[in-house]
């Protein structure tokens, strides 16, 4: 079976001036396949695919393992480099695009943060210039809003919650003050994915040889077994194109996905399509005979 995880696939078309294409294979899969409840985000879809129970779904330690090949020994969080911007009476945050993050920028921010917070048991590290992690020498007793849910929103309802919420809010605020004099695109951090790496668990599907998704790689490295009957296909390009409002990139990503799905259908492969919007579609070759189910355009702007 091929399991496609494609966040943003069914999001509204980003540019009314550019007509979205017809996608016969994808449209047929959605029209004639079996629809069922699915994951509401890519990370959740990955954890479910690997069979990881909710209590063990800590993103940061798995991503660190995926990027470095090293098992982290303690508590840690994602520390996303972000840009905060005031908008009237609220504060918004936006991720800093990975293309503009350099090793020098990361080093300046890490040095400033670590000099200030050394006495608090916190250490900021970068596995790559665009992938930062915060290590804590004690348990993290707070919950955090994932970056993809917080970006572009007012932050009042997105701040840390729980027993140590006030302390973690102060860390966020102090970090803004620390980074401000550096005059970089990065003027703060956003934390999520807190936890410790569990003992090996779950079963890893087959990943593409050139797979770069750090969570998928970390889950595979921490898996207790292998599921060679499932090949996982991760498609992040649509989500990235949406975030940048780049309709041309969205179109190219859709066409590549359509070609891959059409090829798999032609070969008689069982498929699972997960658009990360709370639904998923399962396809087996016999479903192509459901002629009474008419295919419709994926995007409503199509005439």
Image (cartoon, grey):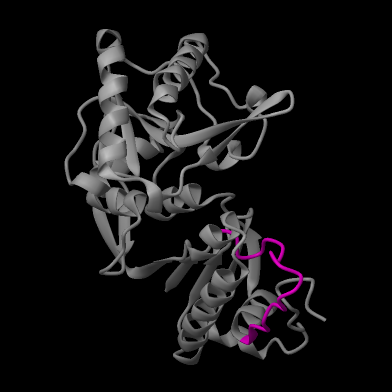
Picture coordinates of residue 222 (x, y %)?
24, 46
Question: Can residue 136 be spotted in the picture?
Answer: no
* As drawn, 50 above or below 59: below
167 relative to 282 in the view: left or right: left
* As drawn, 155 above or below 221: above
Question: Looking at the image, which residue is at 51% across and 35% down?
Answer: 83
Does residue 140 belong to the magenta stretch? no
Q: What residue span does the magenta drawing correspond to?
A: 7-24
Question: Can residue 168 be spotted in the picture?
Answer: yes
Location of residue 155 by image quarter: top right
* As drawn, 94 above or below 263: above
214 or 281: nearer the viewer: 214
Q: Quadrant of the C terminus?
A: bottom right
Picture coordinates of residue 18 (x, y %)?
71, 76
31 relative to 104 in the view: left or right: right
Does residue 12 belong to the magenta stretch? yes
């Amino acid at each position: 079976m091929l399991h496609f995880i494609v966040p943003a696939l069914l999001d509204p078309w980003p540019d009314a001036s550019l007509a979205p294409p017809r996608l016969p294979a994808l449209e047929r899969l959605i029209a004639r396949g079996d629809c069922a409840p699915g994951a509401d985000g890519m990370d959740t879809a990955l954890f479910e695919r690997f069979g990881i129970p909710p209590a063990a779904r800590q993103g940061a330690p798995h991503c660190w393992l995926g990027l470095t090949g090293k098992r982290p020994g303690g508590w840690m969080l994602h520390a996303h480099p972000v840009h905060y911007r005031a908008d009237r009476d609220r504060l918004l945050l936006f991720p800093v695009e990975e293309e503009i993050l350099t090793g020098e920028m990361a080093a300046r921010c890490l040095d400033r943060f670590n000099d200030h917070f050394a006495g608090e048991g916190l250490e900021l590290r970068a596995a790559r210039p665009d992938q930062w992690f915060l290590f804590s020498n004690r348990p993290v007793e707070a919950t955090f809003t994932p970056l993809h849910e917080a970006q572009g929103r007012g932050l009042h309802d997105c701040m840390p919650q729980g027993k140590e919420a006030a302390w973690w809010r102060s860390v966020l605020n102090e970090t803004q003050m620390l980074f401000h004099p550096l005059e970089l695109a990065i003027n703060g951090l956003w934390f999520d994915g807190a936890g410790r790496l569990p003992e090996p668990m779950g079963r890893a599907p087959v990943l593409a040889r050139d797979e770069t998704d750090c969570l998928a790689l970390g889950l595979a490295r921490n898996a207790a077994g292998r599921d060679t009957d499932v090949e996982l296909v991760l498609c992040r390009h649509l989500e990235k194109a949406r975030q940048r409002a780049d309709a041309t990139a969205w179109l190219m990503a859709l066409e590549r996905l359509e070609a891959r799905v059409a090829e798999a259908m032609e070969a008689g492969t069982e498929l699972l399509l997960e658009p990360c919007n709370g639904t998923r579609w399962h396809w087996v070759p016999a479903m192509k005979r459901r002629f009474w189910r008419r295919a419709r355009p994926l995007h409503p702007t199509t005439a």
